Amino acid sequence: MPPATGEAGQGAGRLRPGWSRLRAQVLAEEPNCWCGERASTVDHRVARAFGGTDQRSNLRSLCPQHAAAKDLDDRVIGAKLDENDELEDNDEPGKGSESSEPHPDSALRANRARREEKLAKCA
């Protein structure tokens, strides 16, 4: 799951090497959130917890309100993915594998991808 601090560059109270410089670069290049408000946070479009990187193309500036909404969304998705992983780990071999229904996290990932596409178009 994403860091509990709400700041993308933090985790367990430590900054990653080079994060301060990268954060300053992103905020200088994008001083405003996509909504027009002044940005104060640098966000990973795809959270690091979900395989996102610190590449510039995965970073964007957000205002406090949109950063909080994105953090909450990432936490909800992360919790649901964790639940699904636990269910998969506890499945008995051969049980439930013949189900015609899609895996529950397929919809979560598809919804997240659609939301990311919409946000990218606004940026």
Image (cartoon, rainbow, N blue to C red):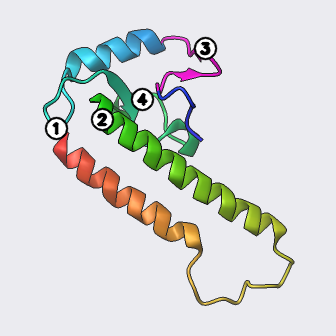
- Packing grade of label 1 (10 A; few <14, some 14-19, many >=20) is few
Query: Which of labels 4 and 2 is toward the front?
Result: 2
Dot placed on the residue nearer the N-terminal end, 4 or 2: 4
- Give the vertical position of 86 relative to 123 (above or below): below
Of labels 2 and 3, earlier in sequence is 3
In the depicted structure, whether residue 122 falls above or below residue 21: below
Q: Marks 4 and 2: CB-CB under 8 Å?
A: no
Label 3 residue SS: strand
Q: Looking at this view, is 61 or 38 the one in front? A: 38
Element assignment for label 4:
loop
Q: At label 4, which amino acid type do we have? A: Gln
Pinpoint residue 23: horizontal percent, then vertical percent. 37, 17
Question: How would you rate the neighbour count of disc 2 (Cα within 10 Å): few for under 14, some for 14-19, many for 20 or more?
Answer: few
Q: Report helix, strand or loop for mark 2.
A: helix
Residue at the disc numbered 3: 14
- The tag on residue 65 is 2
Q: Specify start and end residues of the magenta stretch as a single range.
A: 7-18
Q: Main secondary structure of the magenta part?
A: loop
The image quadrant of residue 2 is: top right
What residue is rendered at 38% in x and 31% in y? Answer: 43
Say the numbered circle drawn on residue 35. Answer: 1
Quick one: label 4, few (<14), some, or many (20+) residues within 10 Å?
few
Measuring 67% from the left and 64% from the top, which residue is drawn there? 84
- Where is residue 66 drawn, in percent x and y? 30, 38
Q: Is residue 122 visible?
A: yes
Mark 4 or 1: the one toward you: 1
